[in-house]
Image (spheres, rainbow, N blue to C red):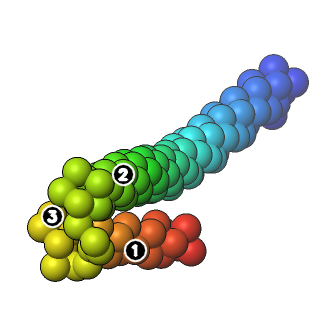
Amino acid sequence: MGFRKKVKVLLEQGTQVSKELASKAGEKAQDWGEKGLQASKDLMNKAGAKAQDLGERGVLVIEIKQLKGQVQKLVDTLGLTAYEALVTHEAESISVGTPGIKEILDEIASIKETIEQKEGELQDRKER
């Protein structure tokens, strides 16, 4: 085999090796790309779930604050009702049977129960 023929064979072999390396590199790059894409999707799903959880916790905190505000208003109303019964209506004493008192106390108890439920739910979410 002549020199030119040997050079031609070596060049063809070199070209073939280069093509195989490029093909393998392309496959590896595609594999890495797919793995990277899947990892990104997984991360986005986890981030989305965490954001939703934080949003739901925020809603619970706001609801609890609003309910506590309602309780405070009812306590104010209870005080006013007691004052009116004692001063305006000249009652000697007041009790749960005094008009308006039981209803307010029942409403306060109901709201406090709701607050406890929501605080429990909030605590459960924090522990997850």
Q: Which residue is mark 3?
A: 100
Q: Are marks 3 and 1 in contact (CB under 8 Å)?
A: no
Q: Nearer the viewer, mark 3 or mark 1?
A: 3
Q: CA distance from mark 3 to mark 1?
A: 25 Å
Q: On screen, 118 above or below 64? A: below
The residue labelled by disc 2 is 76
Element assignment for label 1: helix
Under tag 2, what secondary structure? helix
Q: Amino acid at mark 1?
A: Glu
2 vs 1, front mark: 2
Badge 1 density bin: few <14, some 14–19, many ≥20, Cα 10 Å: few
Looking at marks 2 and 1 on the same chain, the residue that comes earlier in the sequence is marked by 2
Amino acid type of disc 2? Answer: Asp
Query: Closer to the camera, 9 or 112?
Result: 112
Q: Quadrant of residue 3?
A: top right
Q: Quadrant of residue 78?
A: bottom left
Which residue matches tag 1?
116
Relative to 65, say whether 21 is above or below: above
Give the spatial CA distance, label 2 vs label 3.
13 Å
Res 38 seen here: no
Q: CA distance from mark 2 to mark 1?
A: 21 Å
- The percent coordinates of residue 50 (x first, y second) are 50, 54
Residue located 65% across and 35% down the image? 22
Foreground pick, 110 / 8? 110
Residue at (56%, 41%) from the top-left corner?
33
Point out the residue furthest to the top here: 4
Upstream in sequence: badge 3 or badge 1:
3
Q: Secondary structure at mark 3?
A: loop
Percent position of residue 97, x then y:
16, 79
